[in-house]
Image (cartoon, rainbow, N blue to C red):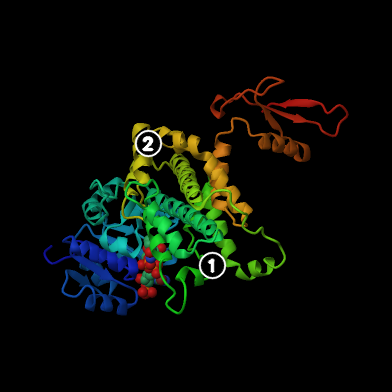
Amino acid sequence: MNGKADIGVIGMEVMGKNLALNMESRGYTVAVFNRTESKTKDFIEGPAKGKNFVPSYELQNFVSSLKTPRKIMLMVKEGAPVDGFIEKLLPLLDKGDLVIDGGNSFFKDTIRRNSELTEKGILFIGTGVSGGEEGALKGPAIMPGGQKEAYQLVEKIFTDISAKAEDGKPCVTYIGPNGAGHFVKTTHNGIEYGDMQLIGECASVFKKTGMNAEEIAGIMEKWNGKSDILRSYLIEITADSMKEKNKAGEGYLVDIVADITRMKGTGTWTIQSALELLVPVPTIASAVFSREMSQDKDLRLKMGTILNIPEAEKLPEDKQKLIDIAHDALYIAKISSYAQGLALLQAASREYKFELNLGEIAQIWRGGCIIRAQFLDEITKAYKENPSLPNLLASPKFSDFVNKNLWKLARFIEIAHKSGVSALGMASSYDYILQIASPVMVSAQVSALQRDYFGAHGYFKIGGEKQPEIITNSEKKMREFHTEWMLPGRPEKEITK
Ligand code: NBP
């Protein structure tokens, strides 16, 4: 098989080109193909010049240029382009060849493709690749899902090209069967949305209290200090980008950037999955809703002339006190948001039999990907100490901090609201903690009766006649009742099924 390529990459856009360069830099010969020929040519004559690449301009030639079993990585736009390429590749492949979809595909598409290809004897991996352009080139976090034997075919290549965490461990591991890799990547992106929203809310409050972009960048730089619990890639790039000057005039770029955040869909998929699996992810949802609100600039301009938003209150804290409160508030909000995302992974693992190992997932997120952070080391350790944590917030690593400092998150939200700044993400994180730590949710008791009143939907009773006992789902002791609200004396009957 002399002269043939070790792996092939289809899709010569940002991600495909950089991944291919990364692979080649680790000693692999890489075959490349793109639907539009000129992109392959530009690549071969540009960054790939003089390197070990095998370009093809016909799919048949591309397939023939690969060592068997063939390993083909699709780095194209998710959806129809992925199905289109699979359809064209199928007649050219042999049993035992491997197709890898490295784009941001919807996990249910991955499950479907996996079963369609398995029927034809072709191995299939759906993998998340995180880290953007720089990560793809220098080392991304890789989240592969599919058959174990498929993973074994590319384990060495993926390990070689992946980012390495500070302790040298590669940021790749076998995630699980079927759509597991893409589910984990989607949830990673949902968590990323949450982080971005929470950081943005801190910056909003700082700005409202009179700080300029440079000052806010300075705070974020400190928060990214070597031993700071908030140290992370997203804090680092926030600091760096906020310092950027307005090249067209006075001031800072951040002050003239349109306040509109677009999105491609992974945040929405995260929430959709959470809704399907009955897992609350309010912080991630708040981030998606905030992006949606940002996009309706016309409406916001109009409503801003109709509704009176409070002006910044005279803050009782001095500036440093406010910064300290915001620091710990952000950390707690982040813990809450990650607790939500990991709870979603846990539920998906049960529902789709993904066999996810949350500790290993946190471990591979420590480097290469957009949410990489010091904090993920702590999450990794928390799951190592107790692999069956019911929720991240149950780990003493986090609950101790939350118990001591939760008031700061409450205070931050109060300051934001009294200053007329939305803190939807922070408030969602805070309320998640309040709800998850409520043995009795009175609002749920009230709603249960409302539902029975208007719709005869029944309600459960959880114990004695006078004081409800605290029971758990697993005890299944709940008795179901209906009250005949319209009948005289409102008789109550037990519903037996
Ligand atoms: P894009 O997502 O912009 O996709 C561009 C590639 O898709 C090109 O090769 C293009 O071919 C091909 N393509 C399109 Br568009 N429509 C096609 C069709 N109908 N048939 C065949 N090919 C088609 O590239 P990217 O930004 O490099 O991302 C690749 C994947 O990685 C995506 O799924 C993306 O969501 C994911 N991802 C991106 C990033 C990032 O930072 N950009 C990060 C992580 C993951 P053409 O050249 O002929 O138009």
Q: Residue 190, position in %: x, y?
A: 47, 53
Residue shown at 41%/66% (left/top)?
Answer: 243
Q: Is residue 233 above or below residue 294?
A: above
Q: Answer with the quarter of the image where residue 430 lies.
A: top right
Q: Quadrant of the N terminus?
A: bottom left
Q: Secondary structure at mark 1?
A: loop
Instruction: Tell me the tag on residue 374.
Output: none
Q: Residue 86, position in %: x, y?
A: 36, 63
Viewer-proximal residue among 207 and 349: 207
Q: Using a 10 Å C-alpha cutoff, classify the residue at mark 1 as few (fewer than 14 neighbours), some (14 to 19) or many (20 or more).
A: few
Q: Residue furthest right?
A: 488
Instruction: Tell me the tag on residue 259.
Output: 1
Instruction: Tell me the tag on residue 382.
Output: 2
Numbered circles on residues, count:
2
Q: Is residue 307 left or right of residue 17?
A: right
Q: Quadrant of ligand 1?
A: bottom left
Q: Is residue 82 visible?
A: no
Q: Is residue 219 above or below residue 472?
A: below
Q: Is residue 164 visible?
A: yes
Q: Is residue 407 left or right of residue 185?
A: right
Q: Amino acid at mark 2?
A: Ala
Residue shown at 17%/71% (left/top)?
Answer: 51
Q: Answer with the quarter of the image where residue 422 lies.
A: bottom right
- Mark 1 C-beta closer than 8 Å to ligand 1: no
Q: Residue furthest left?
A: 2
Residue shown at 59%/33% (left/top)?
Answer: 438
Sequence-wise, the earlier of marks 1 and 2 is 1
Q: Nearer the viewer, mark 1 or mark 2?
A: 1
